[in-house]
Image (tube, coloured by chain):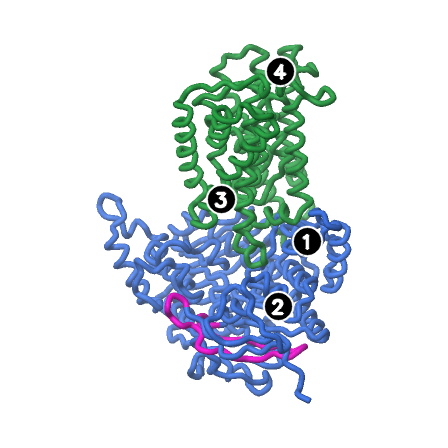
Chain colours: A blue, B green
Amino acid sequence: MSPPAPLLLVEGIRKSFFGVEVLHGVSFTLGRGEALGLVGENGSGKSTSMNILGGVHQPDAGTMLVEGQPYRPADPGAAIAAGIAFIHQELNLFGNLTIEDNLFIDNFPRRGGLPFINRSAIRKSTQDHLAQVDLDLAPTTPVARLSQGERQLVEIAKALSRNARLIIFDEPTTSLTRREVARLFGLVAKLKARGIGIIYISHALDDVMAVCERVTVLRDGAVVGTGTSRDLGVPRLISLMVGRSIETIFPQRTAPPRPSDVLAVTNLGQPGVAEAITFTIRAGEVVGLAGLMGSGRSELARMIFGLDPFRSGTIAVEGVELRDPTPARAMAAGIAFLTEDRRGEGLLMEAPIADNAVLASLRSVANALGLIDGKRVAAASRTMAQKVRLSTDRVEDTLVKHLSGGNQQKVVIGKWLMRAPRLFILDEPTRGIDVGAKQEVYRIINALVEAGSAVLLISSEIEELMGLSDRILTISRGELTGGFDRLDFDREAIMTAAAVGADHAKVSS
Amino acid sequence: MKSGNRLALLGLQNAPLILFVVVLLTFGLMSDRFLAIANFRNIVIQAAPIGILAIGMTFVLLTAQIDLSIGATMYLTASVLALAFTGLPWPVALLLVTVLAAVVGAINGLIVTVLGVASFITTLSTLFVLRGVAMWMSETRTLPFPDRITDLNRAGVLGIPSAILAFAAIFALAWVVLHQTAFGRQIYAVGEDAEAARKAGIPAKRITFACFVICALCAGVGGFVTVTQIGAVGPKYGDQVEFAAVAAAVLGGVSLFGGRGSVAGTVFGAILIKTVQNGLNIVNADPYIYPLVTGSIIFLAVAVDGLRTRILDTLNRRTIRPLQAN
């Protein structure tokens, strides 16, 4: 007797876009109840592979078998019908609809032969599936009211309601709190125990190691390695991903911080958000801000940049108080702010690189009459592109939406660098970008600091904070709860200080 | 400050209703004829054509599109009716009108979904083309309708006038479709995020297409009801009604960005606009002031909507730490 067919067998998948082959024969297998990690840099072919599996794109060549049966979905609907659910990084839920409507949006049960929705049936079924993912919410709750973590659980409940045999997770943890991540991993274990196969895509390699039995590494559209998580290990994964071994991810900095303060925040407070926050950042210094999601770390950055109001306290840049900060005043004082949401706040996706690059410094590219000078725009953006080592120098006719995540991030950073900021606030500067691009971002930060600027770095990755910062401050419930100098960096101590009182944090709507 | 905000929000959320009461009281105080039952009947009859058009427009707006060609569709279908089909019994005539309207809607829908042209541009062009065709066919004459069609205006069932019956029937049908069928819920999904809808296996293009057909169907029916009321079709027929229809929908809380609103709100919006015009008429206001007042009310409603969104944002801002009582 032959052994039973694996849950999924992918063999020799090829795919070209506009005549350029991006997948050169990708193959992998997945068993029932198994979790397979899929890792690779941006542009390595992970997304394309999964979009083919999820029916978003169709392969040019190759075969896919689900439990031994040929599988070739024509559209996402066909994939769902075959029991393959794809939980995208940007969740596909509709905020204007209720949970139950979202669960059945493409497949409403009807009353008899009539076209009317069978409300009682979907309510009952929704309650059951919400219980399976331990989500205690009424089926009629509008999705707009849910947190990111809750929305993800709703997506999983939706997959379960379709009797999914295979669930693909694309970067599921990027916008979750630590507790939500723990809850997600517990749920994934339960799904595996039920025999459901998991494909887990993430740049967070520790997460991949924690969740997956096996890992497949993609590079440039081909599989470059597959093995058990135990055999591979994170360093080996990284070297497979980038095609060379990376000894030091964090480049060394030579110049120490200088004595003068660039930023001095004194007693900053806003009811419900921040209380008595006092700290300074010196010239040539990187101060890391460690805190859980919802700790007030992003809110603090937004206050300094004039995006959110504060009731008490002062902010001074190079000794001059920033009165009633607005983004325009903060920028005039020499502050730059890289937001955590580059798609939503930082970039014009439909515009070329050049237009994005000069957006924060339009005056400098205007001629004597105050009109924008195309030649100066091109020259300035080309200089920027070289400075941040952008993948292309065709700055005038490459649209930002066509760049990879890492290069998009470099454009946002480059846009601010053009203003030669005195203080650069970076909120999650490496979220969702691959190892190679991360290293480039680190290099840019170091160059900036060595030139005498100050950096406030916010990150969920503790290694990143420890690798780049001269000092780390911890924030919890809108209060600074600790400060660590580079020599005293201790992962455990920092994480403990960042989590002080977090369990009692009141996050109300 | 927070409870004050909540109170303000409660007011803002019911702003159209409050506006309606204010309108009623104002005109009621100015004229005792205004608050008579017979007058309300009149208002609803007058609101029926624009209300039916606005219900159709709501479908298109919910998918984050717009249809500017409904007035032209009305004009074209009514002209064809006047030129060729006046000899037919009215149900057959109505059926032919709706079929012709559906064809127009299908053309709009195809251009938007298959060719991917923005609906604003697509329907702006069909507006001119359809009007041009109708003017050419009618040689820009004003065409009369026979009694067998205009008599419908006075007909009714159980004392309820035909225009109100048509209005009520279309509203009921639209409400059931939007709230009780899969298609209706999917319209909301497409309007919220068309790309996400596609990834969720919803035929987004087919749904958008269907909404253009529904909108044009409503334009055909709304045009037919108008014909029974005014008895003739001329070059100014249906001119700019698309804006009145969009206004009624927006006044009733339908978002131009898709996914938000309902036909109940739209019906309310249409009746509110007609109530104001009726009131101005009863108090013998200067006709030049009509558009001014109507415009102000629409502006007020939209401004209130913006304010409501802002207050909601403030209320929903996350608090990280407990607020000290003070």
- Work out whether disc 3 and disc 2 sit on a shared chain: no
Q: Could you tell me how far apart the alpha carbons at marks 2 and 1 are, in whole angstroms? A: 18 Å
Task: Identify the subunit bearing mark 1.
Answer: A
Q: Residue furthest bottom?
A: A1
Quote the CA–CA distance across marks 4 and 1: 47 Å
In the rendered image, is residue B185 in sight? yes
- Marked residue nearer the N-terminal end (4 or 3): 4
What amino acid is labelled 3 in the image?
Answer: Gly
Residue stretch rendered in magenta on the structure = A17-45
Task: Name the residue carrying label 4.
Answer: B27
* Nearer to me, A294 or B79: B79
Q: Quickly name the residue at label 3.
A: B109
* Residues under numbered marks 2 and 1 in contact, where contact means CB atoms less than 8 Å apart: no
| Residue at mark 4 to residue at mark 2: CA–CA distance | 61 Å
Q: Amino acid at mark 1?
A: Phe
Q: Tell me the subunit letter for badge 3.
A: B
Q: Which x, y percent locates residue A247?
A: 45, 83
